[in-house]
Image (cartoon, coloured by chain):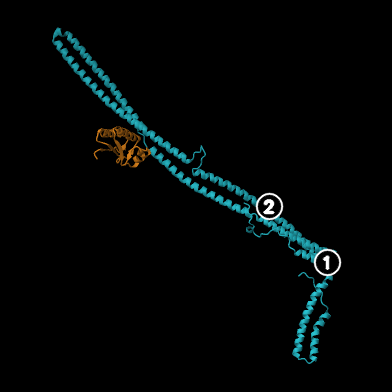
Amino acid sequence: MHGLPSATPSLSLRLLTHTLPWLLVGLLLWLSVPVWLCLLVGALGSVIATVVLEHRQTTETDTAADTTTLPLDELDAFAQSLNTHGHTMVNELSKVDSLLHNAISEISQSFMNLSQNIETQHQLSSSLIDRYSGQSTKSGEVNFKTFAEMTHNTLGFFVESTIETSRISMQLVERMELITQKIGLILKSSSDMDSIAKQTNLLALNAAIEAARAGEAGRGFAVVADEVRALSNRSTEFSDVINTHISGVYEDLKKAEDAVSHLAAKDMSFALSSKKQVENMLGSLHSLNGHTLTVVTELGELSQSIGGTVNQALTAMQFQDMCSQLLELVRKYCNKLVVYSAAVSALSASAPAHQLPALRAANEELKQPPHNPVAQSDLAAGGIDLF
Amino acid sequence: MTNTVSLHPATRFDFNSFRDFRRDYEVALASPTVRVLIVDMKNVQYIDSAALGILLLLRDHAVSANKTVEIHNLHGIAKDVLEIANFQKIFTIR
């Protein structure tokens, strides 16, 4: 209620109004009307008079207050403090708006950077996934798998060449065995030759004896017999030389066979251990790759999910815009209060007759709501999609 | 089976066992009724590359004589070595 204190109705009027019903009761008693009826009429009359008086009082206030003088000093003080507080509120609201704006800008920028970093992280994990799942097509890139396969192949090649060397060596050994057999035959022939020479020697000796027995006639034959003995001796010498040479060849062949045996006989445990190592390496690499792939895939999914959350946060940052508009509205309300306080302050300068209408006009102006640009009250209802 | 011959390499199947082994297989190769030579590895505890060469040599001779070589009862180190040497591709292994 913004009405001013109304003027009090005059005492005589009130007295008259309240005594009138009871004067009527006295009149009725005097006219010998029953007492209960007189009292009833008096009570009703009193009530009616009071109601009439009250109604009259309010209408009088409305019509007669135009000329009432306002308590301008108090109003002015009230307007002053309203003005001060209004200005302070406007200033503080500006500060809040600016603080909000700066903070939200920084947070938004941080989230943008975060989003970019997550994108980079996602790309990195994607490249890792390509690499570990063996889909990388970059040339000249040797991964662990290829390396292990190459080692395996090299080992296979080495084993193969070792075995081939052994095969050829055994072939050589076989040939040398044949040669040894041939040498045995040669030795046998040589020994046959030797026995022939010995028999020849014996024959020549017998011939020499027979020639000596023949005397002068056998002298020439004795010379021939000596020559034959000499030849048989030489033949035995040759046979010995051949035997010596053949023995030398046989010894050399034995040495060659020893050398070949070293060439042929290679312990294969190197291949066994190497193959096991390569297989173990491949196995552990496989499991390692699998584990890495799983982890990297999970990391990629995680960064994608973080990216989604960050984007949601960026969307949520629009609340700053709405808050700013709401603050603007509050500022408009404050400004209205400031304008109102200025109008109240100006009352003292105007003519007394115009003071109350001016105040009423200011009141009316204050009642009007300022233009509200924010129709929505929450983010979900806003539905603004930045992305 | 009359047309198969079993050969029994020494416990240490290496270069030094060549002569005995060759003596056995040459008899078998010379026999016209023999079609399959079975190398029984039951007793073999150790094998070196010379033995692998011997087996390949035996196979060469057998092929020329129109016979086949089978390797039986492989186990232990001999089994591993023959697998590394890919002998399962050249020989029938049982």
At horizontal 24% and vertical 17% (from top left) the residue drawn is A235
| Residue bearing mark 1 | A355
Q: Identify the disc placed on residue A40.
A: none
Which of the pair B40/A321 is nearer the observer?
A: A321
Q: Is label 1 in a helix, a strand or a loop?
A: helix
At label 1, which amino acid type do we have? Gln
Residue A336 as seen in the image, left or right of residue B19:
right
Residue A201 image-quadrant placement: top left
- Residue A6 drawn at (x, y percent): 80, 73
- Residue A361 drawn at (x, y percent): 79, 65
- Residue A385 drawn at (x, y percent): 63, 54
Q: Earlier in the sequence, mark 2 or mark 1?
A: 2
What chain is tagged by disc 2?
A
- Residue A62 drawn at (x, y percent): 80, 72
Q: Decide: is A382 above or below A50.
A: above
What chain is tagged by disc 1?
A
Chain shaded orange = B
Chain shaded cyan = A
